[in-house]
């Protein structure tokens, strides 16, 4: 009876958590504005890194929600709402994308008409790489993501009140329709925002690479948040360290998947040895970028693999909190490694440390806002009691 009352109890996060989020957002964007006046191109690229990072968290989170519905998983129901809350970052991204659309000249070389006219490769891609079609694709992707996010979360939160099992069936059908569209729109976003930074280069599995990194980052964010909420008494007492094993295992699997895709992309390009493909990796091995490349391998694969390899490590809250924060930092290095070599200037600049404050702040603010208005546990989901029994 005590546990039954607990799961219906809605709590707000401490006020200082939300205030910290707003402070970080304000600090990040104010310093970002200063950096823009100092060096517009570098600042624009750092803003793009922030946007891509938040986008990857949002995309990965909504993917986790859809996959749970499709697979009928029971063990993850208790913290599915955490993924739903992180997926709501799409609402903020609709606003954050606008400065990028108005500042495309500082980001993409294919926006320079004079440069395109002298480049036969870029000239041949103008039917796809032009500002009008680019904006149309951005709007299309956000409409797809926003529509499915809105419907999935609407049904989920409505179920808290009605307890209708039919709403779960609706979300299963929505998820089945979303997954193929998710694969298409995620690939479009990866190609448009990242691959087109070097419009000469292409990779047939770059979309999969971006997908792998997004899921790893969102899983890390969900796992860290679940542990912190559990420590503060916000989740059901049935959520024990035993259940962390499932999250840790899933995180370990996708770390290996990311490494496999990253190596496959490199290996195929190295083996083909085509100049238009190898140049992308050459840019990441010259002028000091080799240190960042090696650091990425260490932080995004070697360390997480070693830490998560044993079974006890997947059930240790302290170790999981450390490695999830480590992975979130490694994902930032990954996005930085993709974006920044396309610019001139030093490998590392003081401007590169500004927008991470805004990233943390936005995630805190969005999560705190959603917690105020929704239950942290989907109390109306028919699989919740089974999930609790699995934990006990």
Image (spheres, rainbow, N blue to C red):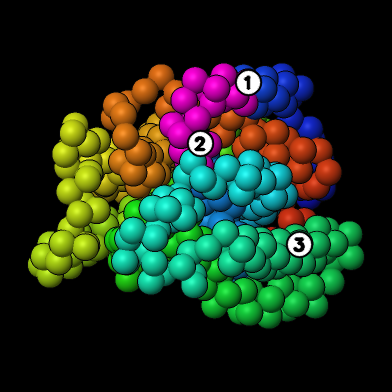
> Image point 49% across, 70% down: which residue?
128
Q: Which residue is mark 3?
A: 150
Label 2: state its secondary structure: helix
Which label is found at residue 44?
2
Magenta segment includes 33: yes
Residues in magenta, as a range: 28-49
Q: Which residue is mark 1?
A: 30
Q: 6 and 367: which one is in front?
A: 367
Label 3: state its secondary structure: helix
- Per the model, the C-alpha gap separating discs 3 and 2 is 30 Å
| Relative image position of residue 189 (x, y in whole percent) | 51, 61
Asked whether the residues under the numbered discs 3 and 1 touch, taking CB atoms below 8 Å apart as contact, a structural biologist would say no
Q: Residue furthest right?
A: 162
| Relative image position of residue 321 (x, y in whole percent) | 45, 34
Relative placement, left or right, of 329 versus 8 is left
Category of crowding for the residue at label 2, using alpha-carbon neighbours closer than 10 angstroms: few (below 14), some (14–19), many (at least 20): many
- Per the model, the C-alpha gap separating discs 2 and 1 is 14 Å
- Per the model, the C-alpha gap separating discs 3 and 1 is 31 Å
Q: 251 and 340: which one is in front?
A: 340
Q: Earlier in the sequence, mark 3 or mark 2?
A: 2
> Image point 46% across, 38% down: which residue?
45
């Amino acid at each position: 009876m005590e546990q039954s009352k607990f799961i219906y109890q809605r709590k707000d996060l401490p006020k200082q958590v939300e205030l910290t989020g707003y402070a970080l957002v304000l600090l990040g964007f104010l310093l970002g504005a200063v950096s823009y006046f100092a060096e517009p191109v570098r600042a624009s690229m750092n803003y793009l890194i922030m946007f891509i990072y938040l986008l990857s968290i949002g995309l990965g989170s909504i993917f986790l929600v859809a996959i749970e519905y499709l697979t009928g998983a029971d063990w993850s129901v208790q913290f599915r709402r955490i993924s739903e809350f992180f997926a709501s970052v799409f609402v903020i991204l609709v606003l954050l994308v606008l400065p990028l659309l108005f500042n495309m000249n500082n980001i993409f070389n294919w926006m320079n008409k004079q440069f395109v006219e002298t480049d036969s490769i870029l000239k041949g891609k103008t039917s796809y790489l032009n500002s009008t079609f680019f904006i149309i694709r951005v709007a299309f992707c956000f409409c797809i993501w926003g529509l499915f996010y809105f419907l999935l979360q609407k049904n989920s939160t409505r179920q808290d009140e009605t307890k209708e099992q039919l709403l779960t069936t609706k979300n299963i059908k929505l998820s089945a329709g979303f997954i193929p569209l998710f694969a298409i729109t995620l690939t479009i976003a990866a190609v448009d925002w990242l691959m087109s930074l070097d419009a000469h280069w292409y990779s047939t599995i770059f979309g999969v690479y971006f997908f792998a990194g997004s899921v790893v980052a969102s899983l890390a964010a969900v796992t860290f948040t679940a542990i912190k909420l559990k420590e503060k008494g916000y989740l059901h007492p049935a959520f024990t360290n035993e259940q962390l094993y499932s999250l840790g295992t899933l995180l370990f699997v996708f770390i290996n998947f990311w490494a496999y895709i990253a190596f496959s992309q490199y290996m195929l390009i190295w083996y083909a040895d085509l100049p238009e493909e190898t140049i992308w990796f050459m840019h990441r091995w010259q002028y000091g970028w080799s240190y960042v490349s090696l650091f990425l391998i260490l932080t995004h694969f070697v360390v997480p693999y070693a830490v998560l390899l044993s079974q006890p490590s997947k059930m240790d809250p302290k170790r999981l909190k450390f490695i999830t924060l480590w992975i979130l930092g490694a994902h930032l290095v990954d996005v930085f490694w993709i974006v920044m070599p396309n610019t001139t200037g030093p490998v590392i600049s003081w401007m590169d440390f500004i927008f991470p404050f805004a990233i943390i702040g936005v995630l805190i603010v969005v999560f705190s806002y959603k917690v105020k208005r929704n239950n942290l546990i989907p109390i109306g989901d028919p699989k919740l009691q089974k999930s609790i029994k699995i934990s006990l």
